[in-house]
Image: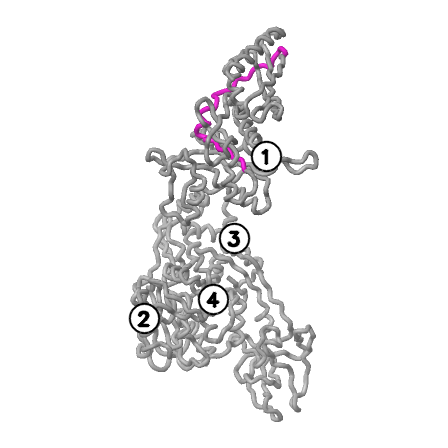
Amino acid sequence: MKVPISWLKEYLDFSLSAEGLAEVLTLAGIEVDGIERTALKFSGVVVGEVIEAHRHPNADHLWVAKVADGKEILQVVCGAPNCRAGIKTAFARIGASLQDEQGSILKIKKCKLRDVESFGMLCAADELGIGEQHEGIVELSPEAAVGSDVAELYSEIVLEVSLTPNLGHCMSIYGLARELSALLNIPLKIPSFSFAEEGESIDKCMQVTVIDHRQCPRYACRIVKGIRVGPSPEWLKKRIEVCGMRSINNVVDVSNLVLLEWGQPLHIFNYDAIAQKKIIVNSQTAFSVLETLDDVVRPIPPESLLICDAEKPLAFAGVMGGKSSAVSEQTQDVLIESAYFTAQAIRKSSKWLGLRTEAAQRYEKGINPNGVKDALNYAAYRLQQVAGGQIAPGVIDQKAHEFLPKKIACRIARVNALLGTQLSLREVASLLERLSMSIEERQSELIVSVPTYRNDVSIEEDLIEEIARLYGYNQIQKPIPVHVSSTIPPAQSAVFENAIRQRLIAEGLQEFLNCDLISPAQEEMLFESTLSKESCISVLHAKSAEQSVLRTSLLPGLLQVVKYNSDHYQRDIAGCEVGRVYFKQNGAFKEQAAAGIILSGKRAPYHWDPKPEECDFFDLKGIVENILTGLKIERFRFDPSHLHNFHPGRQAHVKIGDAIIGVMGEVHPKHIEKLDIGQKVLFAEWNLNELFLHLPEQKMVTDPPLYPGSERDWTVTLKEELPIQAVFTIIQRASSRLLEKVSLLDLYKSEQIGKDKKNATFRFFYRDTERTLAFETVEREHARIIQAITDSL
């Protein structure tokens, strides 16, 4: 919202700079996004009042005017058709400077026009660079002081204010001034105005029926007859435009002026276009379409609140008016509508229609139901001021009920406990009274009467927030924090999850965070046959189909991460995720902690020698081994698996004893092709709940060995389909006291040994912790283990 400081000063006397004002507002929770300053192209121009004007004796298109500039009355020759007695305009004295579009400077001098002397110049908007109008001189506000600098009227400083949804009461010049009055503790100037009523009473000219009182609790209107629709005077046009609105004509601009100044949306109907002079406010009508002011024929949504006459719809209440009843240049009589529509009704219509108007925004944030009539009267006053006409006697004002202020109890002990202050009862009452809240004191609490324009204040905590804002957040002492440790120990499962997360990151993996909800298409594509269809959990009231099923695996989300990065030419992925998976088991809902690893692309950054290669199954297996070894788990193994989401022959179960703690492998090519990833993807997932159960309770630290060991290498020819893990399993079963470690040293394949064969070289390391091993002892033990392997294979 744009807020001209000069407009604020009509309601408040303050000397703060724009920056100081912005700081006060921001500290009070009303954020100021920016400060704009208008640069002007003239100097020496003052407010002049035309005392009299008559035709030039030697020219039909010129006027000779007597102009008061606050010091003297001067004669000025003017060619503007609107030069007339009584108006206030921009008067360039002798010596004043004007600048044209090309940047040339024009100095005002004494001159003669058709033998008549002219001591200055009456200026049009384009001559001052404040508008495009050239046909007539600027018409300033009647309240402008004669002799004051016009630059002060147009050199505007504008605050760009950002308002949160709870600050609807600040969404106007008067509302913001009222807030500043409380913050700065300076009196607010209450606007006053008066007008004469004449002609036929409104009760004889118009009939109003409000059928839907629930969505329209209050509806008021006035009639003004005999107006002249035309361009707005310069002061009105300037006020509208400096706030970011476009000037249309004097009638429309008046409704926008009241919107900006008082925060009350209005609508002005062409009185002659209202059939049978009846206004009906209803949400249950048979009408199907309405052509709005923007020349769009819009379907009328069901139960949308409408303003209708006896034959047709006239407007979407609080959102936008219809074209059939719009004010035109030929309009002479108008009906001014000022109403209180509920925020829910306007929000519903606005969303259905896809229209986000200034009026709708204010209704959605909530307006003051008790300000409806005052804003209506002010609009009639301003309309008569700029467009003439007669204001019909009386106001039609229909209310469903009285709008009484809320009464809220505020305990002083509660205030000080929440804010950490030591405010007295009187201090709290004083702060709240600055917000126009009436106070009734009762021992240690206050009964606060909240004005009806404060829709955001409904409970005691809201009042305490207002007290904190006015008292000043910076004045509240910040106590030194005291650390109090909880007597409840941390959940060991949560500690374990964090440990897994840190170990995965230490392996060089980037942590990913995915939503627990996936689409049915993802669930169908990646459904594992080991689960039943009934085990999947669907959301009852999903916001969208893309997030309507709880994931049973981390794979769908991590595959989407790979696809997104691949589509953006980031093809080297090494990531992990620690999260939850969900399923149904025996009719009960289960939630399980899981950790996942995803690898794709190169295993290392590009280097000229050696060239980086694509990561493979064994890179993934190495990470899994590192994690399990780091957790001090020694007896784990990898067994072949047959899951349909993985490539056949490139997958495995991760086991500890007989328990399956995870799966790993290369994602099936059909998934890669369907997602259009274009490169192989490796994935591993662990059941953290199961893994947690197999953590060793403690790991005993042993002394470094005192005696040397001995190595033996052995090569064996194996069938291609036989996993190396089978050899390690046989070695473990051999249960050698002297064998400290065995590792795969080399794996060799060639046509000489056969297409379905492979040579595997193992290195055995033997050591006795009590003595130095003899050569013969190592040979016997090694031969025993080799024989055990040979017999088993």
Q: Which residue is mark 3?
A: 27
- Which quadrant of the structure image shows residue 413? top left
**Badge 1: few (under 14), some or many (20 or more) residues near its Cα, within 10 Å?**
many
Q: Which residue is mark 4?
A: 260
Q: What amino acid is at disc 1?
A: Cys
**Badge 4: few (under 14), some or many (20 or more) residues near its Cα, within 10 Å?**
many
| Residue 683 counted in the magenta span | yes
Distance, label 1 to label 2, CA atoms, is: 73 Å
Q: Residue at x 68, y 72 (%)?
A: 103
Give the label, 2 or 4, closer to the camera. 2
| Residue 266 visible here | no
Residue 495 placement (x, y as % from top left): 48, 30
Q: Looking at the image, which is closer to me, 563 or 747?
A: 747
- The answer to whether mark 1 and mark 4 are in CB contact below 8 A is no
Answer above or below: position of 590 versus 134.
above
Q: Secondary structure at mark 3?
A: helix
Q: Which residue is mark 1?
A: 615
- The answer to whether mark 1 and mark 2 are in CB contact below 8 A is no
Distance, label 3 to label 1, CA atoms, is: 54 Å
- The answer to whether mark 3 and mark 1 are in CB contact below 8 A is no
Distance, label 3 to label 2, CA atoms, is: 45 Å
Q: What amino acid is at disc 4?
A: Leu
Q: Which residue is mark 2?
A: 280
- The answer to whether mark 4 and mark 3 are in CB contact below 8 A is no
- Which quadrant of the structure image shows residue 401? bottom left
